[in-house]
């Protein structure tokens, strides 16, 4: 059950961190290191317990770079205990949720006529999309984050078959929401980057963007769609009505500063 979701994550990070340095792929874990305008970031995602020597080698490699990094574990086990012994902090959990696209999608409440959604198809709209998303995700460094996001996703392009597509959500004609669809392989897709400005929340913008992305995923032959949610976060308000269910939890551990 876990393997396809791990592959989904592997593909996502390979796409997202286009300017990465030192990315490594391994059957037991995904490892990356990237330099952003906002911060330097290293990470490892593990789908199973690593042997002691591999575990120590990864720790040593990250510590040599003297940069903060994350470990994301699929379960709290011996590796989690080892990380805690070295000063790492578990900062809660993330919910991996899925929706079976081969089944009937539940009927949703009537659409808010003040809301409409548009797929990003040009550089101007991608710039607006980047601004909306980064204001939400990186409120302390919105300009730097916007520039990085715009440059990274612009390289992927806007073709219908592109592995990433983006949507803008409008309220009364004003862009207030942004979100992405990630296609990994022929049958698996993911909902990413969902953000809604405060003035647009509670108006059905997130639901409308999710509906468009789900429809595109179905049209492109996806059989299952996934997402990663913060526990009790706003995204649950539109994921639950569509029928998403939690598949498993993952536990991020942050390195000591």
Image (cartoon, helix red, strand yellow):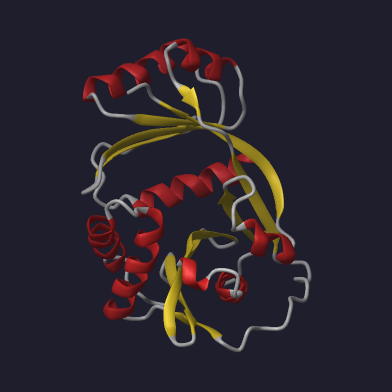
Q: Which of 170 and 122 is in front in this view?
A: 170
Res. 55 in view: yes
Q: In this image, 94 relative to 182: left or right?
A: right
Q: In this image, 245 relative to 8: left or right?
A: right
Classify 160 as above or below 36: below
Q: Where is residue 232 in the image (x, y as percent from the top left)?
A: 64, 48
Q: Where is residue 115 in the image (x, y as percent from the top left)?
A: 55, 83
- Classify the position of the N terminus by image quarter: top right
Classify 7 as above or below 134: above
- Classify the position of the C terminus by image quarter: top left
Q: Where is residue 56 in the image (x, y as percent from the top left)?
A: 39, 13
Q: In this image, 74 relative to 197: left or right?
A: right
Residue sitting at x 28%, y 62%:
146
Residue that sits furthest to the front in the current view: 199
Res. 179 in view: no
Q: Nearer the viewer, residue 228 or 14?
A: 228
């Amino acid at each position: 059950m876990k393997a396809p979701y791990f592959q989904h994550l592997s593909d996502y990070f390979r796409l997202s961190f286009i300017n990465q340095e030192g990315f490594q792929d391994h059957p037991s874990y995904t490892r990356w290191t990237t330099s952003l305008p906002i911060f330097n970031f290293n990470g490892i995602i593990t789908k199973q317990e690593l042997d002691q020597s591999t575990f120590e080698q990864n720790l040593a490699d990250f510590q040599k770079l003297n940069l903060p990094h994350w470990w994301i574990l699929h379960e709290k086990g011996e590796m989690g205990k080892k990380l805690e012994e070295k000063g790492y902090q578990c900062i809660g959990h993330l919910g991996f949720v899925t929706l079976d696209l081969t089944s009937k999608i539940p009927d949703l409440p009537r659409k808010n006529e003040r809301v409409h959604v548009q797929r990003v198809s040009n550089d101007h709209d991608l710039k607006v999309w980047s601004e909306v998303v980064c204001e939400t995700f990186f409120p302390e460094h919105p300009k730097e984050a916007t520039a990085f996001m715009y440059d990274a996703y612009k390289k992927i392009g806007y073709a219908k078959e592109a592995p990433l597509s983006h949507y803008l959500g409008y309220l009364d004609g004003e862009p207030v929401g942004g979100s992405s669809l990630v296609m990994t392989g022929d049958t698996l897709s993911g909902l990413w980057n969902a953000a809604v400005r405060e003035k647009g929340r509670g108006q059905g913008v997130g639901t409308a963007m999710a509906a468009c992305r789900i429809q595109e995923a179905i049209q492109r032959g996806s059989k299952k769609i996934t997402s990663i949610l913060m526990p009790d976060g706003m995204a649950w308000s539109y994921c639950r009505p569509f029928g998403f269910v939690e598949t498993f939890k993952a536990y991020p551990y942050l390195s000591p500063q």
